[in-house]
Structure formats: structure tokens, C-alpha cells
Image (tube, rainbow, N blue to C red):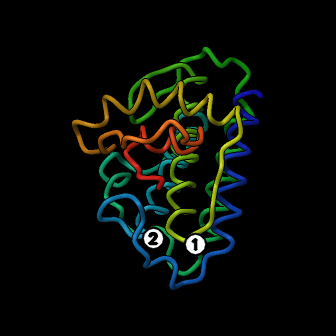
Amino acid sequence: MGSLELLRGADSRLMGLVSTLAASDLERPSPCSGWSVRSMLSHTVATIDAFATAVDGLGGPTEAELFSGSDILGSNWQGVAEQSINRSQRAWATVTDWDKPVTTLLGSMPAGQAIGIVTYSTLIHSWDLAAAIDQPVEFDASEVALAEAVGSQLVPGGRPGGLFGPEVALGADASPTQRVVAFAGRNPL
């Protein structure tokens, strides 16, 4: 499965979960320490916009805004998420050279690496959202492979700054999805 297809699948899962949210769900705690569903979803949508900016140049959140958890959803969380995802899909669909450098909040990197990071973020935060609202999520084999590859590069460097918690120890019977989220510091049990 290609980069764009993986992103589309992650975005689709996120929108499927967002479409089930009631206003009261937004105030539930998320697996992201100290963040409600609203603040975690605001961060997720802001991340999608930040990476779309790397391709379409239309502007997006600053690093401080991205990690503030400030509400960008208002009363139309589904519309805001959908608008961001649609923008992202349009932007990434224009990429023809995945080796071409793009400038992200994380610095310059090949477009293929950038789309991998935003897909990883969307996968992990979709799991966070699903866990917060008690809906099971399992990643498919392609999503697990992407998450393992991107996570192994991204997560260790993010732990000292508190972007990811320590890896959660799991038993040998853990599912591939459980292993992926445990590596990112979430407790899937």
C-alpha cells in the first residue's frame, strides 16, 4: 500500500470516530496525559494542517499552537476535522516526487518521510480517540508496518521532551496494534 493510500485510510478511520462523538465525549480524558478528547483532537487536526502546509504552503499552526492543546474545534468538531483532512488529502495528492524535500515544523525532510509522520500521528491519535470513547481499533498489517518504521525513528527522540511516554511493557500475546501504541507510551490494556 502506498503512502497516500495509508494516509487516506488513517484519515478515514479518524473521521469515522469523530463522526460518532457527542459534545460530552469531548470532555472525556484521553490517553494523552492531561489532555481531554477536545484538546487531543485539536492537536491531531492541527498536526494534519501543519503537515499539509509543508506541501500546499497555505499556512498552518506554529509549533507552540500545535502542542498547546488549545481548542480549535469549537462546536463544529466534525466540520473542522473534515475541512482539515480534505485540505491534507488535496495537498498530498499533488506530490509526484516523494524524495523532494518539504519544510515541516520538524525541519526539512523528503515528502515521503513527512507523509509517514503525519500518517503515524493520525493513526496513534485515532487509537487515543477510540480508547477514550471505548471503541476498539486494530491497525491492519500495512498500518502496523508504517507505525513501527516511523515510530522507531520518531518516538525515542520525542520521549525526553515529553511528546511520548515510556514504552509500556506487554506480554507475548499482545496484538500488533497493542505493541505499536505501547511503544508510543500508551497503555493498551
Residue 63 position by quadrant: top left
Give coordinates of residue 24: x percent, y percent: 51, 85
Which residue appears farthest toward the left when viewing the image?
Answer: 160
Which residue lies under the disc numbered 1? Answer: 77
Q: Is residue 90 left or right of residue 135?
A: right
Residue 29 place in picture, x, y as percent: 39, 71
Q: Secondary structure at mark 1?
A: helix
Question: Which residue is nearer to you in this view: 106 or 149?
Answer: 149
Locate residue 137: give its quadrant.
bottom right
Identified by mark 2, the residue type is: Arg
Q: Residues within 10 Å of mark 2 (few under 14, many from 20)?
A: many
Residue marked by disc 2: 38
Q: Nearer the viewer, residue 55 or 5?
A: 5
Can you say whether 96 is above or below 93 in the image? Answer: above
Residue plotted at (60% across, 30% down): 146
Q: Residue furthest front?
A: 172
> Marks 1 and 2, Cα distance to the nearest angstrom?
9 Å
Residue 99, image quadrant? top right
| Residue 170 tag number | none
Query: Residue 104: percent from the left, percent from the top?
Result: 45, 33
From the viewer's perspective, is residue 58 above or below residue 5? below
Mark before the other along the chain sequence, 1 or 2: 2
Circle 1 crowding by C-alpha within 10 Å: few under 14, some 14–19, many from 20? many
- For the point 60% across and 66% down, the residue is 80
The quarter of the picture where the N terminus appears is top right
- Residue at image point 56% right, 34% down: 147
